[in-house]
Amino acid sequence: MATSRSQSPAPPGRAPEGAANRTDYAGAVYGSMLAASVIAASSLQEPHPRLSLILLLVITGLVFWIAHVYAEVAGEREVGRTVKWHQVREVGRHEWPLVEASALPALAVLVSPWLGAGENAWLALGVAVAQQVTWATLGARRAGATTRQAAAEGAVNLVLGLVIVAAKVAVGH
């Protein structure tokens, strides 16, 4: 799901300098937070609530992916140079975890009735928040963060996820 520019995890402690040794789980973390936000803001009062939410998750992930690819390509291009398709494809691959992050919450929506969760979205919201915390923690560890630093990053992402959950409760969806 998340992409990395280095092939092996960095040892705990300070990670080496340079782009070749960086990890990037930002798309997976951001995509998970986006999925949680979509779930929290959705209303399941439609005739086909599960299908609607699954489509909303996938379409939102794709639209944000396109927006991120465009922003990266347009924002980082060199003055006077045209953008090459291979650059667009490379950025698209790099940003793809943003779309992938909607897959598990969408699957949770699909299987929730068979797990006794009925037509509500709480299971999917829990999955989205859990994967947000997991990707943030794994990204920190892969970058060489200490266990304490990785736990702090996971905790920050848990708080952010719980704010989304609280918003869902407050709005009454």
Image (spheres, rainbow, N blue to C red):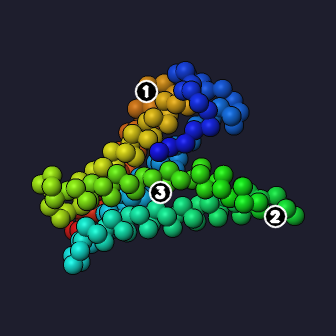
Establish if 6 lies above or below 87: above
Nearer to the camera, 156 or 84: 84
Name the disc covering residue 82, or none: 2
Residue kind at label 2, given as amino acid type: Thr
Establish if 157 lies above or below 148: below
Q: Quadrant of the C terminus?
A: bottom left
Residue kind at label 1, given as amino acid type: Arg
Residue lying at the far right of the rendered structure: 80
According to the image, label 1 marks what residue? 148
- Compared across the picture, whether 103 is left or right of 122 comes to right
Instruction: Characterize the local packing of mark 1: few (<14), some (14-19) or many (20 or more) Cα atoms within 10 angstroms.
Output: few
Residue at horizontal 62%, vertical 37%? 5
Position of residue 39 measured from the top left corner of the image (x, y, whole percent): 32, 63
Element under disc 1:
helix
Element under disc 2:
loop
Which mark is first along the chain, 3 or 1?
3
Contact (Cβ within 8 Å) of mark 1 with mark 3: no
Which mark is first along the chain, 1 or 2?
2
Establish if 11 lies above or below 127: above
Nearer to the camera, 55 or 141: 55
Frontmost of labels 1 and 3 is: 3
Position of residue 63 measured from the top left corner of the image (x, y, whole percent): 51, 67
> What separation in Å lies between label 2 and label 3 (alpha carbons)?
27 Å
According to the image, label 3 marks what residue? 99
Tell me the quarter of the picture where residue 121 sits: bottom left
- Compared across the picture, whether 64 is left or right of 107 comes to right
- Compared across the picture, whether 88 is left or right of 126 comes to right
Frontmost of labels 2 and 1 is: 2
Residue kind at label 3, given as amino acid type: Val
